[in-house]
Image (cartoon, grey):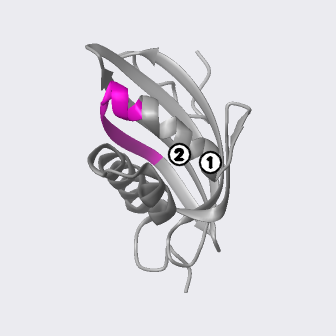
Amino acid sequence: MRPFDDIDPKEFIAGFFTDYTADLLREEDPAVVIDRYHTPDIVEVADGHRMDRDKLIAHARPVRKNRPSQRIDVHEAATNGDRLAARYTLHVLQRGKELDIEVYFFGRFAPDGRMREAHMLTRTRPAGEPEPAPAGGTAP
């Protein structure tokens, strides 16, 4: 069974990151949460920075300290086998500062829904700035 057989890709990726962040802020041991959402051989590359399981666990400390609140708007998502590609905006409130983070996500997931590989490119913009125009639009 593929992880996306019974759910829309937009719902899957939104639920994955929403639940992961909530659990990370709630649970005692970040390693337990990392292992719940990622395979042991996880490789995540975000804006050129490579993280494995141990680095994800270490990354949990500042996330917990800053205690961000967030919501995710998935604009597009598509799957092929165990792969998922998505474009979404992460709306974050952290220490009184609002940010919108555009994310271009390409990942692979295990049959149980855990992430095994991810590549992300991001762009942070001021909260409330309009979304970029979709590709294929008419020229001005």
Location of residue 6 with respect to 109 vertically, above or below: below
Amino acid, disc 2: Ile
Q: Quick one: which residue is furthest to the front in this view? A: 29
Q: Quick one: which residue is furthest to the bottom in this view? A: 1
Amino acid, disc 1: Asp
Residue 64 is inside the magenta segment: yes
Q: Which residues are magenta?
A: 63-75
**Residue positioned 46% across, 39% down in the render:** 60
Is mark 2 in CB contact (under 8 Å) with mark 1? yes
Position in image of residue 32 (x %, y %): 43, 60
Q: Residues within 10 Å of mark 2 (few under 14, many from 20)?
A: some
| Residue 104: mark in rendering | none
**Residue positioned 41% across, 67% down in the render:** 8
Task: Please give left or right for residue 42 compared with residue 33 in the image.
Answer: right
Figure label count: 2
Position in image of residue 37 (x %, y %): 48, 61
Q: Which residue is mark 1?
A: 54
Q: Quadrant of the N terminus?
A: bottom right
